[in-house]
Image (cartoon, rainbow, N blue to C red):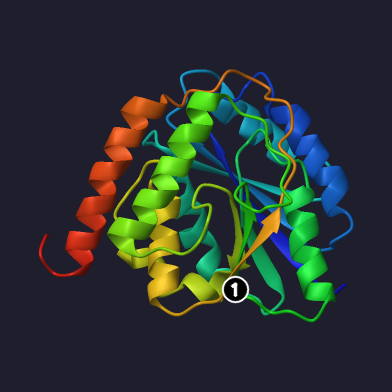
Amino acid sequence: MDLTLSYVVPVHNEEPTLERNVRRLEEHLQRFPGSRVLLIENGSKDDSWGLCQRLAKSDGPVAIEPFREPNAGMGFALQRGVVEEIPRAEPNRWLVLTAADLPFGFTDLDGLVSLLQAGQRPDVVVGSKAHRNSQIQTSPTRTAATLTYRMLRRVIAGMRTGDSQGTFMFRAETVRSIAPKIASRDFFWSTEFTYYAERAGLTIAEVPVVLEEAQRASTVKPFKHGSKMLKQLVQLRLRDAGLLR
């Protein structure tokens, strides 16, 4: 398949597991010649930045490119990766925005490949925990928080996409007009991305994923982060309606 990939990988205090996951990426991406991995280190307290630099110098089969974003926050890393890739947009290159621990392995990528092989051409593909065929095991508290947030996205912002926190895959050209609108620089970044993609009339396809065993304890606190994201959701809707600056 004539497909190349740019994996955008936020790196925040990932020193213990980063090399292993980058090696996994290198091995898998050999199937897609010309692919590259962007390691976006953002505000780490450990030696993640030094490790990113060492991995970039290794003589591996896939290009590893390190970038240092001084501000800690998932959204800072994702925005930086998208901004770096937009000027290098190529017709058959897809960006893959994922987490450093590759939570779904490559089942998200398999979903993208299956769609393209079937002749489908969505603008955005989401490796979605909300897909009915996904295999996800989380705590009852986390599951309840996810379902509540999904309902609030639909009620407050009219969003139809089931999972706004999964893996996101799209061509760089697709988001050229969306990226400047995104104000968030934390976990809400991908919800804003989804909101503006829907508002722009882009076609979003969700594909099933298999959640792998966690490599470290989650830093997500359902009530604390859920409350913050609810506030951000309301602000997003008001801002888009011109009622908030």
Tell me which amino acid carries mark 1: Ala
Q: Residue at x 40, y 50 (%)?
A: 151
Q: Which residue is mark 1?
A: 89
Packing grade of label 1 (10 A; few <14, some 14-19, many >=20) is some
Residue 170, placed above or below residue 151:
below
x and y, in percent, of residue 43 in the image: 42, 30
157 sits left or right of 69 in the view = left
x and y, in percent, of residue 176 in the image: 45, 73
Residue 128, placed above or below residue 237:
above
Residue 217, placed above or below residue 166:
above
Q: Residue at x 41, y 42 (%)?
A: 148
75 or 15: which is nearer to us?
75
154 sits left or right of 15 in the view = left
67 or 20: which is nearer to us?
20
162 or 38: which is nearer to us?
162
Q: Residue at x 48, y 50 (%)?
A: 78
The answer to whether residue 189 of the structure is visible from this angle is: no
x and y, in percent, of residue 105 in the image: 76, 41
Check the picture and name the quadrant holding the N terminus.
Answer: bottom right
The answer to whether residue 204 of the structure is visible from this angle is: yes
Looking at the rendered structure, the number of numbered marks drawn on it comes to 1
Residue 196, placed above or below residue 219:
below
83 sits left or right of 158 in the view = right
Q: Label 1: state its secondary structure.
A: loop
Q: Residue at x 78, y 43 (%)?
A: 25
Check the picture and name the quadrant holding the C terminus.
Answer: bottom left
